[in-house]
Amino acid sequence: MAKIKVDLHPIYNNSKAIDNALLQAFEIAIEKRITEVEIIPGKGTGQLKKKVQRFLQMPHIKPLYHRIENDSKNFGRLFVYFKFK
């Protein structure tokens, strides 16, 4: 099973680049019917993870994915799953 990995460390201080990276990953996942996107905001202060969570709750983004799962072993990583019919 293929998955997309998005590491946000290099663009942590650029809000627009973060949104673009996440949106691009979602578009690729939907286009290629990839069921899992791994997002790595890192541990840090948690602000970047909160930014990602706000992005995922946006009204035009939320219908695109099926569910979100936090990594139980690594606080600085989360998974977004897609469901295709």
Image (spheres, rainbow, N blue to C red):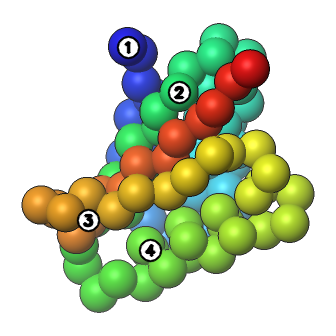
Task: Estimate the spatial distance between the alpha carbons at disc 2 and disc 1, rounded to whole Å.
Answer: 8 Å
On the picture, is 38 further left or further right than 32? left
Residue 3 higher or lower than 51, as above or below = above
Amino acid of disc 3: Gly
Q: Quadrant of the N terminus?
A: top left
- How crowded is the residue under tag 2: few (<14 C-alpha within 10 Å), some, or many (20+)? some
Between tags 2 and 3, which lies in front? 2
User: Are dots 2 and 1 in contact, CB under 8 Å?
Assistant: yes
- The residue identified by callout 1 is 1
Q: Earlier in the sequence, mark 2 or mark 1?
A: 1
Between tags 2 and 4, which lies in front? 2
Q: Nearer the viewer, residue 29 or 16?
A: 29
Q: Secondary structure at mark 3?
A: loop
- The residue identified by callout 2 is 35
Q: Earlier in the sequence, mark 1 or mark 3?
A: 1
Please report the residue visible at 55 percent of the width from the left and 20 percent of the height from the top.
34
- The residue identified by callout 4 is 48
- How crowded is the residue under tag 3: few (<14 C-alpha within 10 Å), some, or many (20+)? some
Q: Position of residue 55 (x, y in %)?
A: 67, 66
- The residue identified by callout 3 is 76
Q: Earlier in the sequence, mark 2 or mark 4?
A: 2
Which residue ends up furthest to the front in the rendered image? 85
- How crowded is the residue under tag 4: few (<14 C-alpha within 10 Å), some, or many (20+)? many
Residue 60 higher or lower than 57, as above or below = above
Amino acid of disc 4: Leu
Q: Earlier in the sequence, mark 3 or mark 4?
A: 4
